[in-house]
Image (tube, helix red, strand yellow):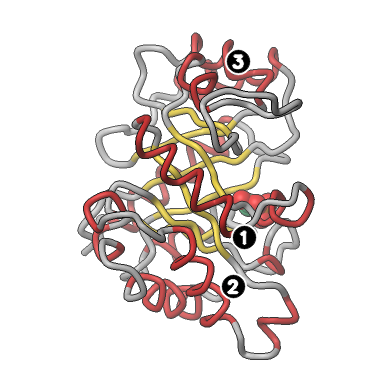
Amino acid sequence: MHAARALVAGNWKMHKTIAESTTFVRALLALAPDFDGVDAVIFPPFTALGAVGEALAGSRLGMGGQTMGDTDFGACTGEISPLMLLDCGARWVILGHSEQRANCCETDAGVNRKVHVALRLGITPIVAVGESAADHAAGRTHSHVVTQITAAFDGVTAADVARCIVAYEPIWAIGTGLSDSPPAANNVMAQIRGSVAGLEQTRILYGGSVKPDNIGAFVAQPHIDGALVGGASLGAQSFADLMANARASAAR
Ligand code: PGA
């Protein structure tokens, strides 16, 4: 039995216009998912945050930014301030996603700075870590993710670490259809959980080709508390199915 309720997080990446985003939210809420049994948060693109914040106001569906800057304001062309996320109603943020690390120069030190800023402002960070196919093949998965995790939480108290979420996302599994096996992912989560004080209480999500038909097998594992799911084709019914299947599996 899991100590924490399952969490389903939808990372929309560079998908959905404002109209598509609000249509998704209204359709999902109309399906009346069981928010008593499972937590859910979506990460729309920045352009849709304001409208989505209004569409989900008063519901228990959470909303977050896909990344953010590491200061409250400043001369950072193209960057989004954490205060701007809060202004739109966002209370969550993904930090250290592998696509940000690979394409946008996100570093372990930058993730650490952002974790401190998010916690100061009351934003819940989902700290994403994961190894490349080459590291995976060379048996470096555990050392790689533990290095990323210890860097991300450097200087963070155990009580504050416990307020965060971690997502383990093997890079080779993201968007490829090649999900990790649930026991193997669970094994990595156990290493992560033991690496920093406070993580024993933190929800750890698996990410990488999660679908409604495999989320239950992941969440049934003792160290897996939910999933971070990519949004390329994420429709409201699929998201509701992810929530229902995660809830059913976590309750076993
Ligand atoms: P995927 O993406 O579900 O498309 O594999 C997960 C993620 O990148 O967070």
The CA distance from mark 1 to mark 2 is 7 Å
Q: Earlier in the sequence, mark 1 or mark 2?
A: 2
Q: Which residue position holds label 3?
A: 22
Indicate the quadrant where residue 174 lies.
bottom right
Mark linked to residue 208 = 1
Residue 60 position (above or below residue 203): above
What secondary structure is found at the residue carrying circle 2?
loop
Indicate the quadrant where residue 141 lies.
bottom right
Q: Is mark 1 within 8 Å of ligand 1?
A: yes
Q: Which residue position holds label 2?
A: 180
Disc 2 crowd rating (10 Å Cα; few below 14, some 14-19, many 20+) is many
Q: Which amino acid does label 1 sit on?
A: Gly
Indicate the quadrant where residue 76 lies.
top right
Residue 249 position (above or below residue 114): below
Q: Where residue 178 sits in the image (x, y, percent)?
A: 69, 69
What secondary structure is found at the residue carrying circle 1?
loop
Disc 1 crowd rating (10 Å Cα; few below 14, some 14-19, many 20+) is many
Rendered-image quadrant of the C terminus: bottom left
Q: Which amino acid does label 3 sit on?
A: Thr
The answer to whether the residue labelled 1 contacts the one labelled 2, judged by CB atoms less than 8 Å apart, is yes
